[in-house]
Image (cartoon, rainbow, N blue to C red):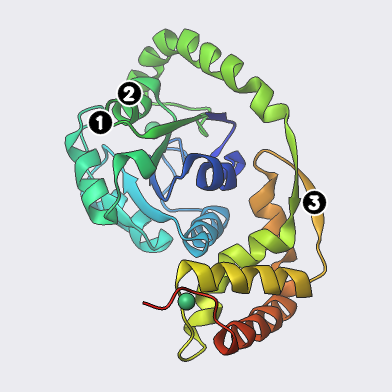
Amino acid sequence: MYASSVFAVDYERLWARRGVRALVFDIDNTIVPFDTEKPTEEAVRLFRSLAARGFRLCLLSNNGRSRVERFAERLGVDSVHRALKPGPWGARRALARMRASPGHTALIGDQVFTDILCGNMMSFYTVLVRPVSARDEFTVRLKRGAERGVVAAYKKKWRKHRMARELRNYMEIFVDQSIGGILDGIEGVCRCDDCVTDMKALALNILTPKYIATQKGDLYSRVDAMRQQFEVDVVQAVTKAAAVVARYPRHQDN
Ligand SMILES: [Mg+2]
Ligand SMILES: [Zn+2]
């Protein structure tokens, strides 16, 4: 997949269509320019919403400990520094930290010959993003010449996806994202797949659907913007649904 930035990646597609549950991020020129000291507010918000969605997250950087750990702390995620990408050693450590398997992991980075190569060798799903820095390290710039052709091929392959608009019921995404947290606050509720699916169905029948047409990547910012407006409704609907399912559970008795 190709995206113009980490903010434009269609994480919902990764989750729903690719089964991705763990995300590995490069830092330099992927999340921020290599000379930016700390993550931006926008980046903090993105990582918060990805964590809320249920993704396990880890930074994977060839940079040194102090910078990488500073980012990890502010973003509230795990990290592996001096990863020696494209070698597999750091990526394996990242998997262990996240307790993730390669088939459910995506790597997001700006460099074909370090990030994407590493991800492909690990059998991760890979997402190439446009480097965020105009100014660039000299060595990185040298490599970029060779990368240009590969990047062009990547972009071409993903152009049709970038254009595609999808019709999504926002409420469904919201319920998916928040049902875990809401059920945490309700005592004695069954969390088996059958019951949770029944609760989602009931909650969504209570809630008025809110359809949004999104372009790849828009989804997360749209969902974030609408969160406050509908939070109370969603909590009420899920709570009501949980009460109904608790009274009439349809799961198989063991
Ligand atoms: Mg980078
Ligand atoms: Zn159950």
Q: Is residue 132 left or right of residue 163?
A: left
Element at badge 3? strand
Q: Quadrant location of residue 209? A: bottom right
x then y, percent, for residue 88: 20, 32
Crowding near the residue tagged with mark 3, few <14, some 14–19, many ≥20 C-alpha atoms within 10 Å: some
- The circle on residue 117 is 2
Q: Which mark is residue 119?
A: none
Q: Which mark is residue 85?
A: 1
- Of mark 2 and mark 1, the one earlier in the sequence is 1
What's under tag 3, amino acid-wise?
Ile
Return the disc, 3 or 1, that comes first in the chain's sequence.
Answer: 1
Q: Nearer the viewer, mark 3 or mark 2?
A: 3
Up-down relation of residue 138 to residue 66 (above or below):
above
Is tag 3's residue or tag 2's residue first in the polypeptide sequence? 2
Which residue is rendered at x = 59% and y = 31% of the image?
A: 4
**Within-10-Å neighbours for mark 1: few <14, some 14–19, many 20+:** many
Task: Residue 91: give x, y in percent of width and height.
Answer: 25, 39
Camera-side residue: 198 or 121?
198
Residue that label 3 marks:
212
Q: Label 1's element?
A: loop
Callout in the foreground (3, 1): 3
Please, which residue is most extreme toward the left here?
Answer: 89
At 25% from the left and 31% from the top, the residue drawn is 85
Q: Secondary structure at mark 2?
A: helix
- Image position, residue 210 (x, y; %): 81, 60
Position of the C terminus, as image quadrant, is bottom left
Q: CA distance from mark 3 to mark 2?
A: 35 Å
How far apart in space, not on screen, are marks 3 and 1 (Cα)?
39 Å
* Residue type of the residue flagged with mark 2: Leu
